[in-house]
Image (tube, grey):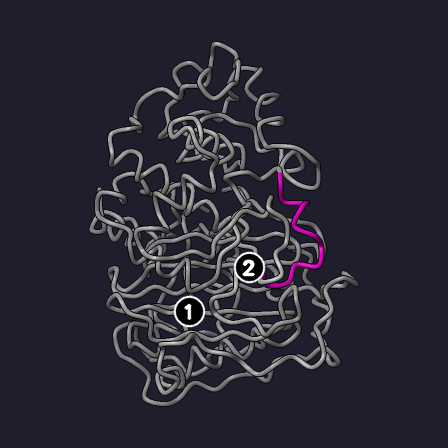
Amino acid sequence: MARATIAAFAAVAIGCSTASADDSATTPIVTAPPSTTTSPPTTTPQTTPPPTATNPEPPSPTTEEPAAPDSIDPPGPTDAPPGTDPPGTDPPATTDPATTEPTQTDPGLVQPTPIPPPTTTPGVPSILNPALPALTAAFNDLIGGNIAVSVTVWRDHAPIFARAAGNGTGWQPVTPDTPMVLASVSKLVTSLSIARLADDGLIQVDGAVPWNEMNLSPDPGWGSVTVRELLDHSAGIPKAQNSWLNLPGSCAEPLAAAVANPPTGSRGKWLYSNGNYCALGLLVESVTGQDRATATQQLIFDPIGVAGPHLSTDGALVTDGPYPLGVARLDRLGGAGTWMASSDDIAAMLDSVTAEDLDTMTYPAVMVDQYGWGHTGTVDGAKACAWVLDQGRTIVVGIVAGNRPSTGGRVCDQLIPALAIDLGIWADTPHRLPA
């Protein structure tokens, strides 16, 4: 299954009547979409002025998401609100998105003053950046109330938009090439590493996981679990969200505890658990005989000339973007969430994905919607969205240091429709699967 099959799954998302994947209910910031999903708008979209550090968003009356706790995992199928309407051709409502999200009160997440003006990637002509007015408005909206923001767009294998704002760990201006916390967008890096090893014949995706070679001694019930099941979150690893954050040590520790018992009754069904991608990260190390950072650099980043990505387990580098909660709290995520990379890096990575890679990185290892495929990332203090749309022609990556909006899915909900309006391919609010 390659790009055409991914597109077929995206078509399924269009007809989904009850799945509201991740957090796709957020209203896009643009307010002047076309009257149909096939005709581009005729006017420049209006935007709502973003809140500022001194004039924050008002508290939301909704209780659907708490203000502070992490949500590295997206909601499960039972979290979809009943009676959700399917995507249609009606324009998005004009409600200010700020009124639909909870106020973040973490005292550590304070916007530096003053926030420097947006920066652009060298080599990307600055004249191209204003050529996407709806996306520019979405970028400007994300700046309000956050510490740093970076957005990169590639189209037809070349960057066409790259902007960033904020201050990094060393108080240097953040650029689109500044590594930032990716949260669960790290899973795209891990799944692509597995795909490259499969392409080289070093992993059999439909073969059994070699637990013993990964220095794990699982219950015999795990003997038939396949690499594909780990990729698809259907291996039966318990969700156990609190096992994967804030504690010292490798993710191998909670994983060993999880596989000491038989797979849960969820085996064969999609149940999003960071344990699956912890296991895949350990598998990369086992197969290559190298640490995960070195192996991934050779498999993914060296071939495209990218040198910036690194693991949060290396600590915060002076060249990184900000994460005031401390990257050490991410250590136990392993292959599920410890990558730090820039929006430029991840856009270049996604542009290098081949049809053979997509045979491995297929739904539900990746999320899909009516625009295409990708992944979102959410931890307290960092949100990310990485998406391939327009039948593979276009890639958008947005990374936020801060808590506005409340999830990586909602970052996608702002960036993807705005970019789609600029490109004339608007198709309503994204409806992601799995939900």
Question: How far is disc 1 from disc 2 in space, using C-alphas?
Answer: 13 Å
Between 377 and 327, the one lying in front of the other is: 327
Q: Residue at x 42, y 64 (%)?
A: 344
Residue type pointed to by label 1 = Thr
Residue for point 34% across, 57% down: 305
Residue at the limit of the structure toward the top, as seen here? 220
Task: Count neighbours of disc 2 (C-alpha within 10 A) and say few if under 14, some if 14 to 19, many if 20 or more.
Answer: many
Labelled disc at residue 338: none
Q: Which residue is mark 2?
A: 180
* Category of crowding for the residue at label 1, using alpha-carbon neighbours closer than 10 angstroms: few (below 14), some (14–19), many (at least 20): many
Query: Does residue 130 lie above or below 145 as drawn?
Result: below
Farthest right residue?
107
Amino acid at circle 2: Met
Element on which disc 2 rests: strand
Q: Nearer the viewer, residue 305 or 210?
A: 305
Residue 307 in the image, given as x and y percentages of width and height: 43, 56
Give the residues drawn in magenta, as a range: 320-331
Left or right of 312? Residue 61 is right
Q: What residue is at 56 percent from the left and 75 percent from the top?
A: 165
Residue 181, by quadrant, is bottom right
In the image, residue 214 lies at what x, y percent? 47, 22
Q: Is-magenta flag for residue 196?
A: no
Q: Position of residue 291 (x, y in %)?
A: 48, 35
Count of residue discs: 2
Residue 147: x %, y % from top left: 65, 69
As helix, strand or loop, the secondary structure at mark 1 comes to: strand
Q: Which residue is mark 1?
A: 152
Which badge, 1 or 2, comes first in the chain's sequence?
1
